[in-house]
Image (cartoon, rainbow, N blue to C red):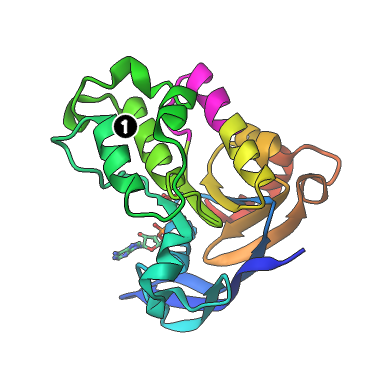
Amino acid sequence: MTETVVVRDLRHRYGSTQALAGMTWSARAGEVTAILGPNGAGKTTMVEMAEGLRRPAEGTVRVLGEDPWHACAEHRARVGVMLQDGGLPGGTRPSRLLTHLSRMYAHPADVPTLVQRLGIGDFDRTTMRRLSGGQRQRVALAAALVGRPQVLFLDEPTAGLDPHARRDVWSLIRETRETGTTVVVTTHSFEEAERVADRVVVVARGRVVADGTVDDVAGGRGLEESYFSLTEDVR
Ligand SMILES: Nc1ncnc2c1ncn2[C@@H]1O[C@H](COP(=O)(O)OP(=O)(O)OP(=O)(O)O)[C@@H](O)[C@H]1O
């Protein structure tokens, strides 16, 4: 299987904080890779580098074979991004925004289908700024999917969602993987990792401390227990 996201020996400091201390992992096409790790472990910093939003001080990132920092518009159109804070304009209504975004792509997803799958129709007459956190989260996910990306980065996609919405998002993630997309999900939820991930990367203090299938990392004692022993010294 093709490795479509490759992170090699990434190092990065913010002043005296060593955010990344030699981070190495990769993700493959048609698989969901979950990145788990305590607050401050370096997940967001690393994902921002893979998205081309931040330039690594040292090390390399390749997404679909290219350096995301120097990538052209065509490359960026093949990568879907869902950020924690959404970054979506406040004055528009969800479907209008998604239709607008879909016109930026040559082969977009069908907006009414996305709206229906993510239950956006229930609040589609409300402007973005008046939506609840969970509703905004669903629109942010739809915005990441609308270009039918080959690589999809999801930063805590179900944080703050109710159980029904969480289940819908998980099935959408699995369906997206079935189309051959590489999905990279950062999460604090063991349940999420167990339900959607093919591979799990556990990070702590800017390094990978475990990497493999969910079963590999769980090591017969459950993902949660294994995670606590892997990251014990961090707190
Ligand atoms: N812009 C910044 N300036 C200074 N320090 C930063 C900046 N961004 C992150 N850091 C620090 O770098 C470290 C890694 O942060 P990062 O946000 O990458 O972690 P994370 O694993 O995504 O955490 P969380 O689970 O809380 O989202 C933390 O110690 C954080 O305080």
Amino acid, disc 1: Arg
Up/down of 198 relative to 49, above or below: above
Label 1: which secondary element: helix
Up/down of 200 relative to 61, above or below: above
Q: What is the x, y in percent for residue 231?
A: 62, 52
Give the main secondary structure of the magenta stretch. helix
Residue 44 among magenta residues: no
Q: Residue at x 57, y 70 (%)?
A: 64
Residue 168, quarter of the rendered image: top right
Farthest right residue in view: 220
Up/down of 66 relative to 235, above or below: below
Dot 1 alpha-carbon crowd within 10 angstroms: few under 14, some 14 to 19, many 20 or more: many
Could you tell whether 108 is left or right of 3 in the image? left
Question: Residues in magenta?
Answer: 158-170
Q: Give the quadrant of ligand 1.
A: bottom left
- Residue carrying label 1: 136
Q: Is mark 1 within 8 Å of ligand 1?
A: no
The answer to whether residue 48 shows anywhere in this view is: no
Which of these two is toward me, 46 or 73? Answer: 73
Q: What is the x, y in percent for residue 31?
A: 69, 51
